[in-house]
Image: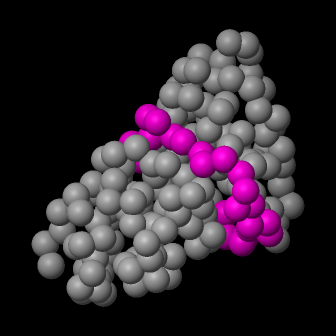
Amino acid sequence: ESHYSYFHFYTFPYTLKSYDNITNNFPGGLFDYVHTISLHDERPFESDFFLRIALSFPSMTSLTVINQQPQKNDNQYLSIIKYPHLKVLNLIEANDDYVEQFLVDNKCDLPNYVCLYAKIESLTTVTHNFTRDATRTNCSKVNYTSFDDVSSFSKDFRKYFLHVDIDM
């Protein structure tokens, strides 16, 4: 575990289009102009943190999560988190818990036509080999994925990701 700190200094109103390396220490606020977000921490992000992010960045179109630590709390009783303008979701460097955070329909409501970047192993695990009903709705909203090894797809993949066009 490395020891480092990130500091963010900004003026109000914050007019930059991106906000990088947000950690668990993010205090919240309203950042209307920010479209591109990256989250990075060595401590786990919990569901309430993602709610704070969604409320703080209402115009967010791109989100990258970099965190290999599993979540500690399974907050099943929080509100469904909505990301109405999200177009790109990068979970390549995220623990499977974060893939689940965004794909399970009682935790997150993704908009239609999201580009999803995730490891095929993570998707296979979280979706129970593309048969889990709780992830079917959000996966059907994905219109692009990027994978290195298309031969590893199950036969249910096409039924699950309805709008993804991948030559197999």
**Residue 101 seen in the figure:** yes
Q: Which residues are magenta?
A: 67-88
The C terminus, quarter of image: bottom left
Q: In the image, residue 96 lies at what x, y percent?
A: 58, 73
Residue appearing at x 38%, y 80% in the figure = 131
Q: In the image, residue 52 lies at what x, y percent?
A: 72, 39
Residue appearing at x 66%, y 47% in the figure = 79
Q: Quadrant of residue 14?
A: top right
Q: Tell me: residue 30, above or below residue 62.
A: above
- Assess whether residue 125 is covered by the magenta stretch: no
Q: Please state the total of marks drawn on the protein image.
A: 0
Q: Main secondary structure of the magenta part?
A: loop
Q: Tell me: residue 146, above or below residue 22.
A: below
* In the image: residue 13, left or right of residue 64: right
Q: Tell me: residue 68, above or below residue 83.
A: below
Q: Quadrant of residue 101?
A: bottom right
Q: In the image, residue 158 lies at what x, y percent?
A: 22, 73
The N terminus, quarter of image: bottom right
